[in-house]
Image (cartoon, helix red, strand yellow):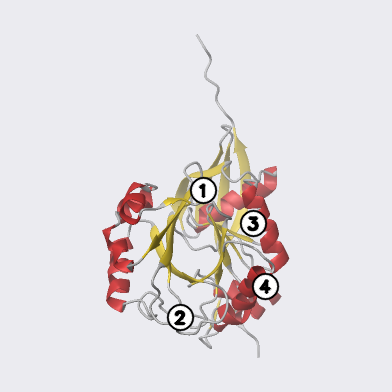
Amino acid sequence: MSTCSTASQELDEPLAGTAATARTWLLLEQPGPWGAKALTSSHLDPALGRALEAAAKGTGVRIALIRRPGRHADFGTPTARQVYAAHTVPGSVWLHSATIDDPRQLLDLDFAALGRGGYHTFDSVLGARPHTGAPLALVCTNGKRDRCCALLGRPLAAALAASGVEGVWEVTHLGGHRFSPTLLVLPYGYAYGRAEAHAVQEVLHGVLEGRIVVAGCRGNSAWERPGQAAELAVRTAVREYGADALSVMRTKGAAPRWEVTVAHADGRRWHVVVVQGASAPPRPESCGTSVLGSPARMDVVEIRELATTTALAC
């Protein structure tokens, strides 16, 4: 039986501009099974899950649950949980971690400050510190959301863990299950689709060097979808792979056409035109529905370097 990920790959649906958007990610360890809406349908107290959703709404913070790769037998409530927060905007990227006993402590966080890139309340409330270990490779395995995430994501997470890759976690829904297996890499916040173990290891090696691998990349979660596509297109055009080198400075317009300004840390800028199209022919966008759809795609139709102005000394 064909799956949504099989159909997407066979039809060569483009990956660029399809990443989930979040300036800041907040990750809470929650072992055991996850439902389709994991924050309120797992062994986490659903009232707490709803409160966390409400606290994060409109702040730029996205909350996800994580668990270690492997079998997910129900061993009851954990005595300690790992928590991570990561801000993904280039120039102010950070990843901090903590171990907590009670997940209700998360309600004491200043979510608005987290979304703006402030880590001080995260550190003070949870006793967190800058993460000094390996980059995080978060593989979506939420099979209750879409079966492709379990069928393809869980083997990928297991293979990475078995090969000794550090920082591997299973994570709840990252969006775009038709691109399974999908993963998010922190601290820089780039998402990948149709991932294979050897490619993920290359991505993580690049992160350690402060370098972004463009192959298989869906975009940086710090930007909206047109900005994601524009930034990746500029990276490819000028062969710039430094993680903090490029930023999306402005996005003007609305669907189906945007004008995006991408800036380099060295002062160069590019004008990028992104047009929203529809992927054809119609195909299932999820294994949970029999309805055929034409997913929106972000097509870059123009890249033009802008003239730079240099101030003359008097």
Q: Amino acid at mark 2?
A: Gly
User: Sequence order check: which comes first, mark 1 or mark 2?
Assistant: 2
The answer to whether residue 284 shows anywhere in this view is no
Q: Amino acid at mark 1?
A: Glu
How far apart marks 3 and 2 lie (CA) works out to: 27 Å
User: Sequence order check: which comes first, mark 3 or mark 4?
Assistant: 4
Point out residue 81 in the picture as x, y percentages from the top left corner: 41, 67
Which residue is identified by label 2? 32
Q: Point out the residue furthest to the front here.
A: 79
Marks 2 and 4 close (CB-CB < 8 Å): no
Dot 3: what SS? helix
Dot 4: what SS? helix
User: Sequence order check: which comes first, mark 1 or mark 4?
Assistant: 4
Name the mark nearer the viewer: 1 or 2. 2
Q: Amino acid at mark 3?
A: Leu
The answer to whether residue 245 shows anywhere in this view is yes
Which residue is identified by label 3? 204
How far apart marks 1 and 4 lie (CA) works out to: 41 Å
Name the mark nearer the viewer: 1 or 4. 4
Point out residue 193 in the picture as x, y percentages from the top left corner: 62, 67
> Where, by quadrant of the figure, is residue 268 drawn?
top right
Which residue is identified by label 1? 259
